[in-house]
Amino acid sequence: MEQEEEKQQPVVTTTLKEMPLSELQITACNSADEGGTCETKLLELGLVTPEDCCKYLGKCC
């Protein structure tokens, strides 16, 4: 009796490339980090989150 080989579909994974920060967001991160306003003014402006500043620039961590 012949053994049937199971045909497996290849596993395809896709990942989205993360968008780098804009110059305005970088400036906001740097200013907030220097001024100690990551959790206040940075959030009020709404341009970028402290988490993104930390992730991309190592600021506001």
Image: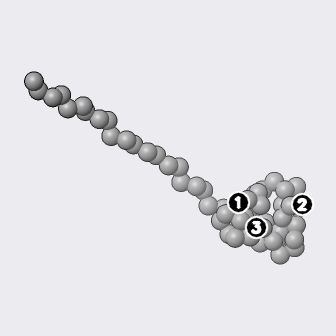
Amino acid type at mark 2: Thr
| Whole-percent x, y for residue 50 in the image | 77, 61
Q: Is residue 3 above or below residue 32?
A: above
| Whole-percent x, y for residue 41 in the image | 88, 61
How far apart marks 3 and 2 lie (CA) works out to: 14 Å
N-terminal of the two: label 3 or label 2? Answer: 2
Residue that lies at the very extreme toward the bottom in this rendered image: 34
Report which residue position mark 1 lands on. 52
Question: Which mark is nearer the camera, 3 or 2?
Answer: 3
Coloring scheme used: one colour
User: What SS does tag 1 mark?
Assistant: helix
Residue that lies at the very extreme toward the front in this rendered image: 1
Label of residue 40 in the image: 2
| Residue occupying the point 84% across, 64% down | 38
Relative horizontal placement of residue 25, taking residue 41 as reference (left or right): left
| Whole-percent x, y for residue 29 in the image | 77, 67
